[in-house]
Image (spheres, rainbow, N blue to C red):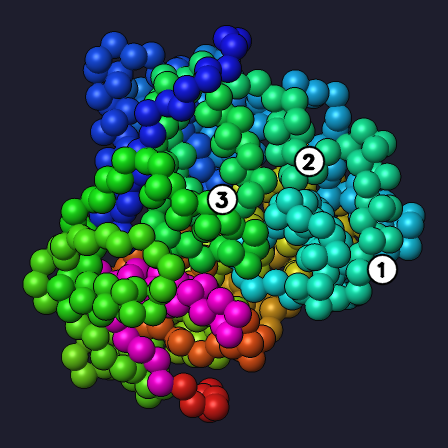
Amino acid sequence: MSQPRQTRPRSSIVLGGPGCGKTTYLLKRVEEYIAAGGHPSRIAFVSFTRRAIQEARERALDQLGIDADSFTGRGDDDPLPYFRTLHSMATRLRRDKTKKFLTHSRYRQWCEAVDIHPESRAVKGRISLEYEVTYATEDDAALFASGYARVLQQDLKQVTDFLGMSYEHAKQRDAEYRLLLDEGYIDHTAVLEGYVEDGESPDFDLLIVDEAQDLSLLQWRCVEKLEINAKEIIYAGDDDQAIYEWSGADVGHFLSLRDTCEKIVLPKSHRLPSVIWKECTTYAVEGIKNRITKEFEPNKEGGVIDSINDDEIIALSLGRHATLGGFNNGETWFLLARTADFLKKWRRVLRTFGVLYMDKGQSSLDTPLCDVIKSYIAVQNDEDISGPKAYQLLNYLHPDVRKGSPEELGISKMTRRPIYPAMIMKRFDLPWWKVLDLRQTDIDYIKGLLDSGYTFDSKPPVTLGTIHSVKGAEADNVILSRRITNKIRSRMALNPDTEARVAYVGMSRARKRLFYYNHKDDLNV
């Protein structure tokens, strides 16, 4: 490694509004560098999210004429060794690699040993970016505060005061958790901390930091470490879409780059038609006070903004909407809310009226129940199934059609041998909905979808999610709930820009039509 340079490298900030082709611009810069004789291994492309890195890797490999499926990004033969999330980059470049990663099972064992009772399934030290923070128990709150303070690089007392929780309890749990790490373990946050303290700074010709508006202060410290021997740095993002402040993102750091970097504004959205573009840009200018001014043009004329009510959503579910037909009209749909609680009603409507949808990244025909059904169909077709699948199937099968319980047949979740049908089944002639112990509502929903022509592999036309969960994605039609909780409303008084940015992201997912949802107390379904 060379000595750190004393002069600041050439730096630019690329500002890309919704659908302005930020990734395309960045990869064009990569292509230009390689075309000029540069080596791909001297390019670093980092982001916090796996989604951004996966897209960048696939498109860059395509430019190089390399099959993306040939490389995992882990081997020494990786042609793009520094296209990584910040956590992956820190793991690769930190010098102390003696510590073991803290697994979920080890974390739970520790909790039981020291009589800590968190209900969160996540390993502490990883701050979720998907949903509003909630605390199931006092220990959950204390452990979250401990991890949050590390991400923010702030004193624990400051964090507990801000979150309105007990400092003494958080201090106790924080001390106990640090003793666990001292045993030789490392968590997600400690990976970054370790890299900042004692990590390598390779000689990069080009360092690209994507989605930079979402980085926490600790992540910015990692970026600063990567910058030390970089010849050129490109920061890319959009401060108007900085929606993760509540989980530690330091949008202020991103905003400060306008004073030190060349500003490049991408000139045109390839997503937003003029009507929706005007709604979004007007909202951003009027609703977000602390922002970088950026002007860009819409994709084309047109677009629709309207309101939508419960009856119309039911009509769309049934395929009977007067002008749009139904959710299965060949277009894509987002049903978006600020928090997950507001999605429950829509989820119930979609299931009641037989709509195939995505939820938390998973198709409603790609669930554990559907896996059981697929296993039964495989057995009916005289196909062997794995031990874990057989164990799962036996737990749902009616006793009259199986040869015994999993325990009686010697099959467990850990069984590694293949299971052939005759080992577990007495008869194969009955359809799955006659022999599996499922709720009738689940049977009606799944059978209705399959009878109407969908398969377990069908791509859902509807995505149900929070605004945070679809950042970076887009759909032809967006139905947006603007209702917020009292907790969020109280925080708006302290920082109104934060919620204005969240609303802006929700609005700007729409390619053709944006519908604002008119709330009622409930739907009678």
Q: Which residue is mark 2?
A: 190
| One can see residue 492 in this view | yes
Q: What is the x, y in percent for residue 339?
A: 51, 69
- Of residues 419 and 38, the one drawn nearer to the viewer in this rendering: 38
Q: CA distance from mark 3 to mark 2?
A: 16 Å
Say which residue appears at 68% left-offset and 36% top-offset.
190
Q: CA distance from mark 1 to mark 2?
A: 23 Å
In this rendering, which labeled residue sits more in front, label 1 or label 2?
1
Q: Which residue is mark 1?
A: 168
**Element under disc 2:** helix
Whether residue 249 sits left or right of residue 120 in the image: it is left
Q: Which residue is mark 3?
A: 215
Q: What is the x, y in percent for residue 117?
A: 83, 59
Q: CA distance from mark 1 to mark 3?
A: 29 Å
- Of residues 31 and 64, the one drawn nearer to the viewer in this rendering: 31
Magenta range: 492-518
Question: Which three-letter amino acid code belongs to the residue tagged 2?
Answer: Ala
Magenta span contains residue 504: yes
Say which residue appears at 23% left-offset and 63% top-offset.
281
Circles 1 and 2, Cβ within 8 Å, touching? The answer is no
Question: Which three-letter amino acid code belongs to the residue tagged 1?
Answer: Glu
**Element under disc 3:** loop
Q: Is residue 49 above or below residue 464?
A: above
Whether residue 235 sits left or right of residue 171 in the image: it is left
Tell me the crowding category of disc 3: few under 14, some 14 to 19, or many 20 or more residues within 10 angstroms, Cα based.
many
Q: What is the x, y in percent for residue 253?
A: 46, 45
